[in-house]
Image (tube, rainbow, N blue to C red):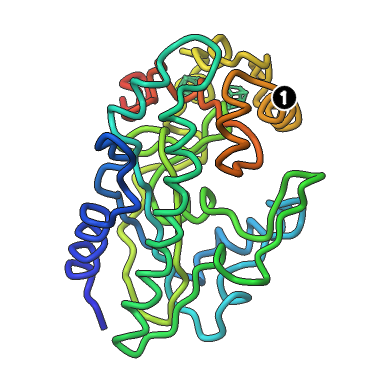
Amino acid sequence: MLDKQLLREKITAFVEHDSANYWHKGLRFFDPPLLGYARVDDPLFQEMKKKEIGGGMFRPPVEWLEGAVSVISYFLPFTEAVRRSNDVADEPSKNWLYARFEGEKLNNRLRKFIVDELAATGLRAVAPLLEDEFTIDHHLLVSNWSERHAAYAAGLGTFSLSRGLITARGIAGRFGSIITAGEYTPLPRDYSFPFQYCSWLREGLCGSCIKRCPAGAISEDGMNKELCRQYLHQKDSLQKLREEHGYPYSACGKCQIGVSCEGQIPSSATG
Ligand code: SF4
Ligand code: SF4
């Protein structure tokens, strides 16, 4: 079995060297990942099922892998170069668009890399997002596995007003997870409720993401997924480019950039 230290080293080296983490002119999509672990018998996973996460579609880890013991979750923070590129007015930057879609190719390669590395030591493992049974209901905008909920259970961060997950490296990036029969002991979570790191949800401060959203999808009450979806499917200045690349819709991410949780836990939420 790969111990945590070796697993971390292998994952970090993969992200550092894999060509899919780089785009033209040397743009790097992701910094080294944060890693967290959860036990599959953590009551949170049953609560997620009961609370109708994913509109009732959510499948706990043991329904993805018989004999599963642990969930390995990671956060890939977007680099400063990607984030600053999108720190402009309403339209998405090209580099943010590439980071969203080309960067997800790196994320898929990382999911497979971890599964293969575990398998090489005799450990069964699955990445739900690479499985045929992974299902998204595009009408209800829900799915039967949630990378962000796995990350929450694994101690990586808490949910935000903008429906992201705020980690120690902020909110701007991508998540992934692997379910395995290997035993990876979690550390205690640093938070006691699901919205602890969001200044607004914690104590009514900040709210910057409300003003940043060009679609008016975020209000004091939360984020309207349908308004966001409509915005991402509308014609934009990058439509030709994204169609050339075969991206199914645009990117935006303005709610994650130029805000206090962009690259860290807001200071008002750490006291
Ligand atoms: S910008 Fe402020 S209110 Fe919005 S998610 Fe981040 S911390 Fe919460
Ligand atoms: S991605 Fe864009 S449209 Fe969607 S909630 Fe964030 S800022 Fe609004």
Q: Closer to the camera, 176 or 44? A: 176
* Residue 37 spot, x, y in % from top left: 37, 62
Q: Closer to the camera, 27 or 66? A: 27
Q: Residue furthest right?
A: 139
Disc 1 secondary structure class: loop
Location of the C terminus by quadrant is top left
Residue at position x 45%, y 45% in the image: 102
In this view, 29 is above or below 106: above
Location of the N terminus by quadrant is bottom left
Q: Which residue is mark 1?
A: 234
Q: Closer to the camera, 68 or 50? A: 68
* Residue 251 spot, x, y in % from top left: 56, 31
Picture quadrant where residue 236 is located: top right
Q: Is residue 19 left or right of residue 255?
A: left
Q: Closer to the camera, 133 or 145? A: 133
Q: Is residue 4 left or right of residue 265?
A: left
Number of callouts in the render? 1
Q: Amino acid at mark 1?
A: Gln
Q: Residue furthest bottom?
A: 122
In this view, 102 is above or below 185: above
Residue at position x 22%, y 75% in the image: 3
In this view, 233 is above or below 218: below
The quarter of the rendering in which ligand 2 is drawn is top right
Q: Pointer 1: residues within 10 angstroms few (<14), some, or many (20+)?
A: few
CB of mark 1 near ligand 2 (< 8 Å): no
Residue at position x 40%, y 42% in the image: 191
Picture quadrant where residue 257 is located: top left
